Amino acid sequence: MRNPLPPVPTNLLDIEVAGDLRRGTPTVRLVTAPAEDVEAEPLEIGGVRITGKAGDVQTVTGDGPRWVAGLGDGEPRQYRKTGAALVRAVNAGLAEDVENGGKAFRAAQLVLPEEASGEHVTELALGLLLGGYRFKVSIEDPKPSVRTLRLVTHDRAVADFTEAVARASALAAATALTRDLANTPSNVKSPAWLAETAAKVAGPGVEVAVRDEKWLAEQGFGGVLAVGGGSSRPPRLIEMTYKPSGASKHLLLVGKGITFDTGGLSIKPADGMHLMRTDMAGGAAVIAATRAIAALGLPVRVTALVPAAENHVSGSAYRPGDIVRHYGGRTTEVGNTDAEGRMVLADALAYGIKKYGPDLIVDAATLTGAMKVSLGLRTGGFFASDDALASSVVAAGARVGEAWWRMPLVEDYAENVRGEFGDVRQTPAGPGSITAALFLREFTEGLPWAHLDIAGPARSEKNYDEVVPGATGFAARTMVELAASLG
C-alpha cells in the first residue's frame, strides 16, 4: 500500500530565470499600486479592476496575461507576499482546469519589472517557493500544482538573478524541511524517527551521530532521560557536524526536539494539546539550517545538537519535586514537568560546550507560552548575552524575512533561578520567558549565546505572506543567514 505520508523533504517547484517569454505558457503581469497621494484611474484588464495591492491576484480573461498580481509599493517584502499569493492562485487555476477537463499546464511565467533588484528577486522567489507548501496525510493523490515558474528579465541580469534564486531556493528548502518535520504527526514522529530522518536528509558534508538511551545514561544526560522516561519510545540525541576547511568560527546550534508534549504529570489541558506535535519546531529548524549551511558551502564550522524526547504520562514519568542531575553534574529542582524543554536543552548545551568548545551558541525552542503573550504569533523573541550577537540575529532575520525582538535578561530575577535543594530551579518565580532564559544561561559557561523562543511564530492557523497553516518553519532561515554572516 502506498505510504500516505508526504515526502520528507518536500519537493519544491523549480524557478528558472530566462531572457524572453515562452509562447503558449500562461503569463502573469505584475503591477504596483499608485501612491496614496497620487490620483490615478483604476487599472482594468479583461474587465477586472486591478488594485495593485501586494498579494492581490486577479484572474483575467481574453488575450494577454492570465493573472495580474499587485506588488504594493514595490518594497522587497511586498514581492515575497505577492509571490506567495500568486503561486496559490496559479495552483488554484491549474486545479480548476483539470477539474473542468482542460489540459493541465505545469509552468507559468512572469516578467520582472525594470526596477527589480537581486533583493526583490530573492524575496519573490521565497514567496513563490513557500506560498504553495502543503502537508496532508491522505489516501487521495495530492492536487496538481505548478512545477516550474519562469522569471523573465528580457536579458537583463540573468546571471545575477539566477544566483539570487539559487540562494532563495536553499533558504526555502530549509523552511520547508522544518515544516515537514514539525507537521509530521506524532504517532509517526518518535525520537527515533526524528533522528533517523535527520541522518537521511542531512546531505553531503554533514556527519550525523544518533545517541540512544543507553549512551545518554552512560554520559549522564539526566534532563533528557527524565523528560523521556514516561514514554515507551525512548529519547535520542541527534548530533550533526559540518566542518569545512578554513573555517574561522565555530557555531553551536541547539534545538528543542520534544516530539510530543502532554505536559507530563503536570498535564496540559486537552484543548490545544494536538498542536504539540510541533513542539520540536526548534529542533527541526536546527536540523534544516545545518543541512542548508552545508549545501551552501558556508565557511563556518557548525555543530548541531537536538535532544529528542516524548514528554508522556506513565508510572515512570518524572515528577514535580524531583532533583535531576544534568550532563556535567549541575542539578535542577523540578517544579513543573511541562517545563520540559529547558531540561533537555540544558543537557545539550552543557555537552556541546564541554565536548566542542564553540565560539558562540544559538538555541531555538518553542519554549514558553509567555512569549506568545508578549509578542504574538508573527515575531520571534530572543535573549542574548552578547550585544554583537544580538544585533547579528536581528539583522540576519531582517534579510530573510523573519522578525525578531530582543527581550531583556533582567538580572534582578537571576537570583530566583538559584535552587534551595539543587543548584537551580526549573520554574522560578518571575516572568516566565525571562526566567526560562536565565535558567538556560546557567549552562552556557559565559560564552556568547542567543536563545530563540519561537513559541509564537512556529505555527500558524492561516495564510499570511509566505506562511501557510500548520508549522511555519520559522527560525531556520535566520540561522542560515546568521551562519553566513560569520564567514
Image (cartoon, rainbow, N blue to C red):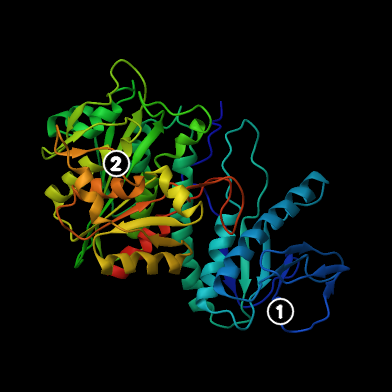
At 45% across and 30% down in the image, what residue appears?
186
According to the picture, the residue beneath numbered tag 1 turns out to be: 36
Residue 265 image position (x, y, % from top left) = 35, 23
Q: Is residue 151 left or right of residue 165?
A: right
Q: Quadrant of residue 83?
A: bottom right
Gap between marks 2 and 1 measured at Cα:
50 Å
Element under disc 1: loop
Residue 422 image position (x, y, % from top left) = 14, 34
Task: Evaluate if marks 2 and 1 touch, with contact meaning CB atoms under 8 Å apart.
Answer: no
Of badges 2 and 1, nearer the viewer stands 2
Amino acid type, residue under disc 1 in the picture: Glu
Q: Does residue 218 show up?
A: yes
Q: Is residue 87 above or below residue 17?
A: above
Element under disc 2: loop
Q: Is residue 453 above or below residue 24?
A: above
Q: Is residue 25 left or right of residue 447?
A: right
Report crowding for label 2: few under 14, some 14 to 19, many 20 or more residues within 10 A (C-alpha): few
Report crowding for label 1: few under 14, some 14 to 19, many 20 or more residues within 10 A (C-alpha): few
Q: Is residue 319 above or below residue 159?
A: above
Decide which of tag 2 and tag 1 comes sooner along the chain. Answer: 1
Residue 18 image position (x, y, % from top left) = 60, 74
Amino acid type, residue under disc 2 in the picture: Ala
Residue 382 image position (x, y, % from top left) = 35, 56
Observer-nearest residue: 335 or 227? 335
At 47% across and 48% down in the image, what residue appears?
373
According to the picture, the residue beneath numbered tag 2 turns out to be: 429
Q: Does residue 16 show up?
A: no
